[in-house]
Amino acid sequence: MATTKAQQKAVDKYVKANYDRIEFKAPKGRKAEIKAHAEARGESVNSFIGRAVDETIERDTRMPAEATGQLPAAAALLSPDILAEAQNAAERTGEAVPEFVTRAVKAQAKRDETTRRMGLNPVTGSKLGQDSETE
């Protein structure tokens, strides 16, 4: 059954009211590759791209900086084990890793300052010498 002009107008009006339009440009030849990939999974190109966007946002929300390789330079100083621990802890608190690490460093700096005021070395726990209180 052919679509009437009135039906098409109604569909266009609905789409305009309920969807945002985003233009996506791909290098020549990539469109066919994307279409074949989507069809192989029983999807339209639009639904495939939507799913790809949704999955990427979800992944980047779980591990924002790690997922994109955009951790601050200071994170390069962390061993893989410590970074994994930070990722797990950040996930439990609902924070991004950079914010979690920043908060953890600030909290530890405060604890260290308190320990120094008590006359103790925050690393070893031993008493500080008279002239080493500003270590």
Image (spheres, rainbow, N blue to C red):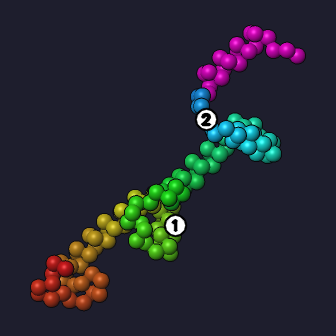
Q: Amino acid at mark 1?
A: Asn
Res 47 seen here: no
- Secondary structure, mark 1, is helix
* Picture quarter with the N terminus: top right
Nearest the viewer among 118 and 54 is 54
Res 78 seen here: yes
**12 on left or right of 113:** right
**126 on left or right of 16:** left
Q: Position of residue 35 (x, y in %)?
A: 75, 39
| Residue 12 in magenta stretch | yes
* Picture quarter with the C terminus: bottom left
Q: Position of residue 102 (x, y in %)?
A: 36, 62
Residue span colored magenta: 1-19
**56 on left or right of 86:** right
| Residue 112 in magenta stretch | no
Above or below 63: residue 119: below
- The kind of secondary structure the magenta stretch mainly shows is helix
Q: Looking at the image, which residue is at 28% across and 70% down?
A: 109
- Which residue lies under the disc numbered 2? 24
- Secondary structure, mark 2, is loop
Q: Looking at the image, which residue is at 52% across and 66% down?
A: 88
* Circles 2 and 1: CB atoms closer than 8 Å: no
Above or below 108: residue 41: above
Which residue is the extreme one toward the left? 131
- Which residue lies under the disc numbered 1? 88
Q: Amino acid at mark 2?
A: Phe
Q: Looking at the image, which residue is at 69% across and 36% down?
A: 46
Nearest the viewer among 3 and 39 is 39
